[in-house]
Amino acid sequence: MFADLKLPNLQLSWPVTVLAIVAALILRSTWLRFKRNPRQLPYPPGPPRRFLLGNLADIPTKGYEWLAYAKLAEKYGDVMYFKAIGKSILSINSYAVANDLLEKKGAIYSDRPRLPMLKEVIGWTWNLVVQSYSEGFAVHRRIVQQRFQAHIVAKEYRPIMALEVRILLFNLHNRPDAFLRHVKRMAAAVIMMISYGHRVTSDQDEYVRLAEKVRETASGAPGSVLVDFMPILKYIPSWFPGAGFKRKAMVVRQLSAAMRDRPYAEIQARLNAGTAIPSLVSSLIEENMSGENVIDEQVIKNVGGVIYAAGADTTVTALTNFFLAMALHPAVQERAQEELDRVVGSKRLPEFADRSDLPFVSAVVKETLRWKPVTPLGVVHCLTEDDEYRGTYIPKRTVVVPNIAAMLHDENDYTRPADFDPVRFLSVDGTSPAPDPARAAFGFGRRVCPGRFFADDQLFITIASVLQVFNIIRPVDASGHPVELKVDWASGIVAFRNITIKALRNFRTSQGEMGVTIEAQDQSGRLPSHADLFKALWIILTCKSIQKIKFSLIEGLPGGTFHSKVEDTSLAW
């Protein structure tokens, strides 16, 4: 009956098939967008998206990103949205927005994005700074936060800071031409003593050099940004042309493992031998061994490693900014020294207890944090749920970039933000002081820096002590005119200067007036021994009058300048 029935040919040509699939995908995508955004709210303002590539060409990736975001914010507002290759990015350029989202909505804005380069290629899943907002993160952060509370910093860490600052003064007195080396040594010495009970007597210390090697190798790896947008690139073989990022990552991965394993192995050996100096890591190991507080060994390694890796870098950058600011603003330096002379006098060095009586010096510390932020773009956050803000829709997994530099240069909060002006933080003639830059400089919400009290204390005691003993001056050219100093920033999470700074000895008074001259180096280039250091401390602490010593900042050779790569000088923060 049906033998002669002919059915229609249902075979579709491939163009029709492709069109059908594309249509189905578009319908599904539209349905999902409607389901997640039923009110059909628009995205936040931002540059118009191009076909296929979206905002790929608009997202700043070529250095000085904070300046580029700030420039775009002048047109699109303090909260901007970018979308490219399936990635959503939200740029926050005011403290008000950061407070609304990262602080008040911290429950959904505290994750970190996937970060394929750092986490999957380099292997930094152990690093608290980039860990996802998870149970593992909570364990690591709890340990660090507990041991860097304000009262613990005051009781246990301030004596170490005070000692190392005095050694810094000794080194600056004897070798002012190497002041950046001395600052690096001091910052590393404080961190290594606190973390591992390890004494750092030289900037050639194995752990100082290891951390420096990690930073130098990790910075500026070509292709690293592209990997974060196209994670499939992580599978490119390291020998493939253009895969330089992969080769660098392999080196950084090995060095990072050494940063965690080597100091941990050393302190374990010292604990077994009974020669360990009490430290944060040794206390964790002992608690673990006694059963008092069982912590996974890998977690202890990670905690020690992240403090070691991150603790010194930010301090060095902030203090470099301070030295530059003093060279550029002698009137500020003079006013701070007048306050120190009045409060502290000339027969001792500043102490932490003096801080409440040193409002202008404290304001210099705040302005150092604000003027040139150590982390201009902070560390990116990631949204774990869809959100609505100011009548716009922000999708889940959006990467949130807090432009800390823009916040701390917001003219609504800081008049003439490009100027280094500590007076803004004082109450003058009944005016209210400017907002404390710490509210943005140390991050936000549940990701705020757990070491902020420690960092603030170290900056204060170092800045106050250096100003008490030294004058920081600009170099002069052959004609005796001051050399122009410009700033050159390098890109990265921490904005290291892409320059070499040296200090020339230029004493206001003769060395003999300090009491005794101790050479910092002998003919073999040996740095001071412990005996030399303690002898120098005795001189500094007991001399009848603390003399102020001048030294000047230059780049490389006499007559050099700080070269700026920022073409638009109006944006040269």
Image (spheres, rainbow, N blue to C red):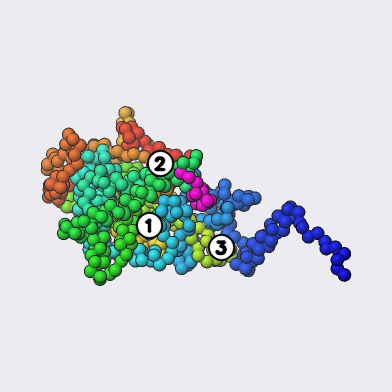
Residue at image mark 1? 127
Is residue 569 something one can see in this rendering? Answer: no
Judge whether residue 504 can be spotted in this image: yes
Kindly report the secondary structure that dominates the magenta region of the rendered protein.
helix
Check disc 1: other Cα within 10 Å, few if <14, some if 14-19, many if 20+.
Answer: many
Q: Tell me whether the residue at label 3 lies in contact with that at label 2, contact meaning CB atoms closer than 8 angstroms.
A: no
Where is residue 145, by image quadrant?
bottom left
Measured Cα–Cα span from mark 1 to mark 3: 27 Å
Left or right? Give the position of 482 relative to 290. right
Element assignment for label 1: loop
Quadrant of the rendered image containing residue 475: top left
Q: Earlier in the sequence, mark 2 or mark 1?
A: 1
Residue at 43%, 61% (x, y): give it.
132
Residue type indicated by callout 2: Asp
Q: Position of residue 56 (x, y in %)?
A: 57, 49
Is 232 covered by the magenta stretch? yes
- Distance, label 2 to label 1, CA atoms, is 28 Å
Q: Which residues are magenta?
A: 225-238
Q: Nearer the viewer, residue 178 or 486?
A: 178
| Amino acid type at mark 3 | Pro
Q: Tell me the residue that label 2 is attached to.
A: 488
**Quick one: quadrant of the N terminus?**
bottom right
Q: Compare residues 35 and 452 and report the one nearer the observer.
A: 35
Tell me which label, 1 or 3, sits earlier in the chain: 1
Asked whether 353 falls inside the magenta stretch, the response is no
The residue indicated by pointer 3 is 395
Q: Tags 2 and 1 in contact by the CB under 8 Å rule?
A: no
